[in-house]
Image: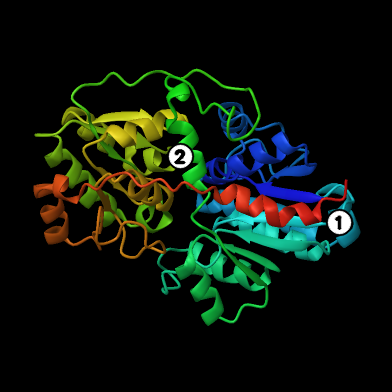
């Protein structure tokens, strides 16, 4: 049996192409939701055409603060004590292989549970490193731990595979042609998806779609997001970004997609100041709607690793509001790592268009490559 362990928006987005293909091929799998983004998971699944999970953990509220994360982790940690009960409740008493994705707390919890239950562990998006334990935190630690535990490591490219070999991981390393986000991005941008979420006609065999509003704002606004712990809990970094955005809004339309933790970190005064300067503050949008806005944007400012990848595939200029990044995508081309240096920020904003590159979505399908390996684990 193939067990898919997810719980965040990024995990749903990046694993959905694999789930579409499994559905189309009629391959059985067990979907497990960790509850990390509990109050939004249903909307993610509805938008992406992913079926309801077989097992849901956690409570009804998302884990979007440090205290909430500690409470959530403690609750799930208790499940590790009784091995047989864990195997029966979380994994349905079925052996096989469990896939976790990326560097989230969900990936770490899923990895520990899979190993405790005696399952083979596969890590999708393995091998990424920033080589700084606390930048980003806790993502860097999660990646190293999960890579050490994994029996099967799906590296998105040759550089990630080389990193795994340097660290002498014990698991089998499989080098992919790209990250699975390229499959999700291609589906979201296909012509038949205009005004809707990605059609799954060609990539998944599914039929579900959900209408989302068309983008009509003119001129096209720059896209801003910020949600990482390394920024949310550094007041001076938030203030520096707000200052940058308010100045930028004097000459350029700006749309800031605000995560709920970011909204709390900004506070009512910060939000009022941004809106007063002309910045458009909007809630997080459905994936297809967001990436189409990103594709049309003059540039983006973000601390998101997935958005860095998407901008690299789209050729969109992007300023990374980070000190370090674990992803090489676009660096030295369309992407600039700010390191919070005002001189770097000013140089980027002076002429972001010179960073634009042609789109370069790969023709290969990394989710299909993963599925070909996983097929041997299907027990009927």
- Viewer-proximal residue among 199 and 341: 199
Count of marks, rendered view: 2
x and y percent of residue 243 in the render? 17, 46
Q: In this view, does 94 lie to the left or right of 323?
A: right
Q: Which residue lies furthest to the front in this view?
A: 363
Q: Name the residue under label 2.
A: 185
Q: Is residue 98 visible?
A: yes
Q: What element carries label 2?
A: helix
x and y percent of residue 215 in the render? 33, 21
- Viewer-proximal residue among 296 and 260: 296
State the image quarter where residue 300 is shown.
top left
The residue shown at (33%, 57%) is 234
Q: Distance between the residues labelled 1 and 2?
A: 32 Å
Q: Is residue 302 left or right of residue 190?
A: left
Which sits earlier in the primary sequence, circle 1 or circle 2? 1
- Viewer-proximal residue among 156 and 337: 156
Q: Is 285 above or below relative to 10?
A: above
Q: How crowded is mark 2: few (under 14 residues within 10 Å), some or many (20 or more)?
A: many
Q: Is mark 1 on a helix, strand or loop?
A: loop
Q: Is 151 above or below relative to 2?
A: below
Residue 95 disc label: 1
Q: Residues within 10 Å of mark 1 (few under 14, many from 20)?
A: some
Q: Is residue 268 visible?
A: no
The residue shown at (29%, 46%) is 315
Q: Is 111 above or below relative to 224?
A: below
Q: In this view, does 265 lie to the left or right of 204?
A: left
x and y percent of residue 369 in the render? 61, 53
State the image quarter where residue 165 is shown.
bottom right
């Amino acid at each position: 049996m193939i067990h898919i362990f997810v719980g965040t928006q990024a995990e749903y987005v990046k694993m959905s192409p694999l789930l579409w293909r499994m559905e189309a091929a009629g391959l059985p799998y067990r979907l497990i939701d960790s509850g990390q983004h509990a109050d939004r998971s249903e909307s993610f699944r509805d938008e992406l055409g992913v079926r309801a999970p077989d097992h849901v953990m956690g409570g009804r509220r998302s884990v979007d603060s440090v205290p909430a994360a500690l409470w959530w982790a403690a609750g799930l940690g208790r499940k590790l004590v009784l091995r047989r009960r864990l195997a029966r409740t979380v994994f349905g008493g079925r052996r096989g292989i469990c896939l976790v994705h990326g560097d989230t707390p969900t990936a770490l919890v899923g990895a520990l549970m899979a190993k405790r239950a005696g399952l083979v562990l596969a890590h999708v998006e393995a091998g990424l490193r920033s080589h700084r334990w606390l930048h980003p935190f806790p993502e860097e630690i999660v990646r190293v731990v999960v890579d050490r535990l994994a029996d099967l490591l799906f590296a998105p490219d040759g550089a990630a595979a080389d990193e795994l070999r340097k660290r002498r991981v014990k698991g089998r390393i499989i080098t992919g042609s790209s990250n699975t986000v390229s499959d999700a991005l291609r589906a979201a941008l296909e012509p038949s998806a205009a005004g809707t979420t990605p059609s799954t006609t060609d990539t998944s065999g599914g039929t579900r779609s959900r209408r989302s509003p068309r983008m009509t704002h003119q001129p096209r606004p720059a896209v801003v997001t910020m949600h990482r712990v390394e920024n949310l809990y550094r007041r001076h970094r938030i203030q520096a970004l707000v200052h940058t955005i308010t100045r930028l809004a004097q000459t350029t339309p700006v749309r800031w997609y605000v995560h709920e933790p970011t909204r709390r970190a900004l506070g009512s005064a910060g939000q009022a100041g941004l809106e007063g300067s002309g910045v458009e503050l909007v809630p997080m949008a459905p994936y297809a709607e967001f990436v189409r806005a990103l594709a049309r944007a003059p540039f983006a400012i973000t601390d998101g690793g997935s958005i860095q990848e998407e901008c690299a595939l789209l050729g969109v200029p992007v300023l990374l509001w980070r000190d370090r990044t674990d992803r090489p995508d676009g660096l030295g081309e369309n992407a600039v790592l700010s390191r919070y240096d005002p001189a770097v920020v000013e140089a980027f904003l002076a002429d972001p268009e010179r960073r634009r590159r042609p789109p370069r979505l790969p023709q290969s399908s990394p989710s299909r490559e993963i599925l070909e390996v996983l097929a041997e684990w299907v027990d009927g």
